[in-house]
Amino acid sequence: MKIESVLQSIPVFNELLDGIPHGVAVLDTNLCVLTLNRFLEAMLGYNSDDVRGVYGDFILRSNPSFRNQVYKQVLESRESHSFDGDIITRRRKKIPVHFTLTCLHDDKGRPSGILIVLEDSSVVKVEDYIHHEESIRNDILGHSPQMEKVFELMSVLSRTDASVLITGETGTGKDLIAEALHKSSQRARQPFVKVNCGALPEALLESELFGHVKGAFTGAVTGNIGMFRLAHKGTIFLTEIGDLSLPLQVKLLSVLDDQEFFPVGGSKKMRVDVRVIAATHRSLRSEVHQGRFREDLFYRLNVLHLPTPPLRERDGDIRLLLDHFLRHFGTKLGRRGMHFSSQALKYLNRYSYPGNVRELRNIAEYSANICQGKIVGIKDLPQYLFRPLDSLSDSQPVLVSPNVSIKEKQTPVFEVQEKPAVVTRTGGWADMEKQMMLDALRESGGNRSKAAEKLGWGRTTLWRKLKKYKIA
């Protein structure tokens, strides 16, 4: 019996594939897709029904480039074969995977297809995470008392399926915390899907979250299963939940209550088993009072609350993070052993970091790129650190007095310091970053790949920043 017949005559076959906690694809002898299991649909972003009959290479885009030869070798030798490689998702994300190829046979022992199992190598060690408090610290740096409280709370939240609301200022690491909660939960082997609720207009966001059926609106030439279905059995992370429109808040509340929803343009309810983690830098209580956020949704999301402390309140973590990020970027630039001078550290420890860890990371990245040696001095720091918050156009560099407390820094008292020996940039971080890109492009003759390499970025990072700053 051919494998196509098996798929049609035994409906439970697909259910068996869905029960495997790895991505699974079945190809026929022509190397065309017969089916994908639910886990692989979530990994790649494709619906099995939409890609059936499509040549496997177009869906399972991976390296090594000799994979076709491997597929044919498995069919000819009828022996299993395993190898490591990468796979490119529909959203062009590269995921390291371990491939296992097995030849399938019909009832007469003839090859009838290939079973391909793809194990996400990035989560191979996930068993070490489950209910292990130390695992939470692997991706989140901090040893301050404030962060110790966060780690203790995370170890408790990872053991439950209840909704979690993560709050805090921008740049405090809410995304990392959400992913760490997923990795240390019982859902760790299942998908973790992130959606930025403030990145898309309402109509597109509804389709992104809940999917749509073919022909639901102009341009919907194919169906879209949506992020909630991709996250089935796993976790969906809704960042910037405070930007969600009121109509979508109603639909989200229904999903949280019933675990069911209608796709856009659909008449059949879809049922999902998803844990929801939400995050926002806004005060949702204030948003509720102003009528911009539903009170019932707020209480539904706020079952468990995890506040993240701003960096200025994390005693002792600034030095730890500065050293970590400088080593990271220094290593990428081929300059191991980079460190800040004592004078530079004195100024960096006084700064209040309104952009929190994200801003500190940018400062370390800037310094690593500007510094020509291994010791980062005052001249290698971003120029805006030496300016008063209310007078960024002032030409004289100024620093916060060492005797000023953290609270006083919010309405700072400045004292003029001696001008650093070399000042190569003016303006805020955005201006300096823009100038860095222009310099790199100029030095590389307009070659974006070389410019990205000079900056220590990926090419897509450079492309995104060029678009952000509207640089042609």
Image (spheres, rainbow, N blue to C red):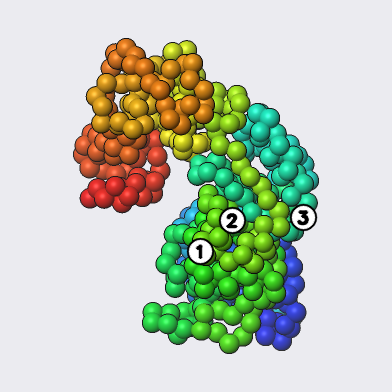
Q: What residue is rendered at 71% in x and 44% in y?
A: 154
Which numbered marker is on residue 381? Answer: none
Calculate the distance from the C-alpha at mark 3 to the C-alpha at mark 1.
Answer: 29 Å
**Residue 116 location, quadrant:** bottom right
Q: Residues within 10 Å of mark 3 (few under 14, many from 20)?
A: some
Q: From what the image shows, is residue 148 above or below residue 98? A: above
Give how far across and how far down residue 81 sits, in percent: 65, 57
Give the answer, above or below, for where 117 lies relative to 185. Answer: below
Quadrant for residue 111, please give it.
Answer: bottom right
Residue positioned 60% across, 70% down in the render: 252
Q: Is residue 64 left or right of residue 433?
A: right
Identify the residue at image location x=46%, y=79%. Answer: 222
Q: Earlier in the sequence, mark 3 or mark 1?
A: 3
Q: Is residue 346 visible?
A: no
Q: Position of residue 445 (x, y in %)?
A: 21, 39
| Residue type beneath disc 1 | Arg
Q: Which mark is residue 292?
A: 1
**Quadrant location, the N terminus:** bottom right
Say which element carries label 2: helix
Amino acid type at circle 2 is Arg
Rate crowding at label 2 as few (under 14), some (14 to 19) or many (20 or more) other CA atoms within 10 Å.
Answer: some
User: Which residue carries the number 3 mark?
Assistant: 160
Q: Secondary structure at mark 3?
A: loop
